[in-house]
Image: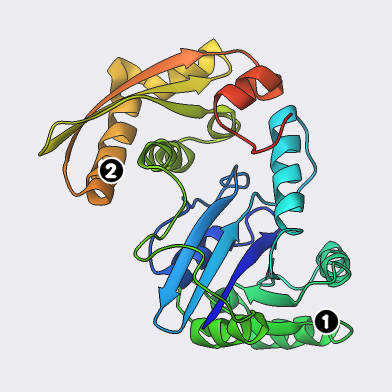
Amino acid sequence: MKAGTVAVIGKANAGKSTLVNVLVGEKVSIVSPKPQTTRDRILGVLTQEDYQIVFEDTPGIYKADNALNSVMQRTAEQTAKDVDAVLLVVDVHEGMRENDKKLVARYEKCALPLIVALSKIDICSENTLIEAIRELSFVNAEIVPVSARKGKNIKELLKVILSVLPEGEKLYDFPIVSDKSERFMLSEIMREKILLGFEKEIPHGVAVIVNEFTDRGEVVDVSLDIVCEKANHKAILIGKQGAAIKKASTLARADMEKLLGKKVFLTTYVKVEEDWRNSRRLIKEYGYGEEEI
């Protein structure tokens, strides 16, 4: 059977996590329209009778402006070195930018099979897409236009990925779809709702830590901290008479119950750790990055 690992790489907000979720058929990565949504390497495992593909979703590539972002960039770079193939996701709905072409050329040199997924073609004009493909004619890589949101060319993309993967044994036992723990997934669900519900810098300065995860049979007790960087951010997160945090928590609890298949009793606390994204100790304590930082 075919079995291998694929690093999913691309600039921030290129649509990597949405594509991984569609390929795997399960929500293994949170998604939002905001850059910096994915902070760590997250595995999505697609297992069929005759193949297994392990997708490694990575943080978006962009200029790091704090210690957390530096860790995220190192995670993306390291992931691209330890796999069987690289799937580079490029958002082309507004055309192929010069830094996109440089990114493609950079990963073409990595000595691994390279597949370029031109994403968001559902909102891309035909002429723009044709021009983007023409501009990548110099690349020694398979190029597949896709729309994860509309499910366009997903089967074709899978065929191309399988064509470059080696023969081998399964890396994970079925029915696993991700390597992340339930605690991690619960914290990510809460962070997703904050990303979707709040504007400007506030969501990017938030970490979510699960303090309690107690399964009582039909009900699961979850207690978590939402860590932000400033006192005024805490006030905004809580909202007038607690309305904002209540709304985010209600949405999060519904997704948590879908994930666990049980009722969830959710308790949330908002606390302040000033400039935690530049604290190497706190970055590690909050679980970001797999290497020493």
| Lateral position of residue 213 relative to residue 145, left or right | left
Callout 1 crowding tier (Cα within 10 Å): few <14, some 14–19, many ≥20:
some
Q: Say which quadrant the C terminus sits in.
A: top right
Q: Residue at x 57, y 77 (%)?
A: 168
Label 2 element class: helix
Q: Residue at x 60, y 34 (%)?
A: 288
**In the image, is residue 27 above or below residue 94?**
above
In this orientation, does residue 226 appear? Answer: yes
- Could you say which is closer to the camera, residue 63 or residue 41? 41
Label 1 element class: loop
Task: Point out residue 210 in the picture as x, y percentages from the top left corner.
Answer: 39, 27
Residue indicated by mark 2: 256
Residue indicated by mark 1: 136
Task: Point out residue 249 in the picture as x, y percentages from the top left corner.
Answer: 30, 32
Task: Point out residue 227 in the picture as x, y percentages from the top left corner.
Answer: 49, 21
Query: Which amino acid lies under the numbered mark 1 shown in the image of this protein?
Result: Leu
Q: Quadrant of residue 225?
A: top left
Task: Point out residue 2 in the picture as x, y percentages from the top left corner.
Answer: 55, 81
Query: Which amino acid lies under the numbered mark 2 shown in the image of this protein?
Result: Met
Q: Residue at x 54, y 26 (%)?
A: 286
